[in-house]
Image (cartoon, helix red, strand yellow):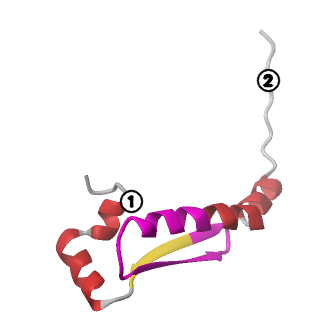
């Protein structure tokens, strides 16, 4: 067997993680996530220091209460099954 050497281009990966295409992909996931949660939830996307981010949050008092009682944000992400 031949030895294979792999060298990661960290600068290239950094560019990819902060690209407009990645931000668009993250935005589509944020929109999909919020669409299944009902009214009172929203999301924002931004490019951080290392990568594109999306965060989802409750905007109305009803949604905030719903999240406190039922962990809606975690359940929507499949983190609290």
Q: Quadrant of the N terminus?
A: top right
Taking 6 as reference, is 66 above or below it? below
Write the residue at 35% across / 73% down. Answer: 38
Q: Are marks 1 and 2 in contact (CB under 8 Å)?
A: no
List the residue tagged with mark 2: 4
Q: Which of the two labelled residues, at mark 1 and mark 2, occupies the earlier sequence position?
A: 2
| Residue 23 shown left or right of residue 4 in the figure | left
Write the residue at 28% across / 90% down. Answer: 61
Residue 69 position in % (x across, y down): 17, 75
The verdict on residue 48 being magenta is yes
Work out whether residue 33 can be spotted: yes
Work out whether residue 19 can be spotted: no
In depth, the one of 38 and 59 nearer the eye is: 38
Taking 66 as reference, is 77 above or below it? above
In depth, the one of 29 and 7 nearer the eye is: 29
List the residue tagged with mark 1: 77
Q: Residues within 10 Å of mark 2 (few under 14, many from 20)?
A: few
Taking 22 as reference, is 56 above or below it? below
Q: Which residues are magenta?
A: 27-53
State the image quarter where residue 39 is shown. Answer: bottom left
């Amino acid at each position: 067997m031949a030895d294979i050497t792999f060298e990661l281009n960290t600068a290239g990966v950094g560019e990819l993680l902060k690209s407009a295409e990645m931000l668009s992909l993250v935005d589509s996931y944020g929109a999909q996530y919020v669409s299944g949660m009902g009214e009172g939830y929203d999301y924002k996307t931004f490019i951080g220091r290392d990568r594109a981010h999306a965060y989802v949050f409750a905007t109305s008092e009803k949604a905030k209460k719903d999240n406190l009682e039922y962990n809606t944000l975690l359940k929507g992400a499949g983190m609290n099954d």
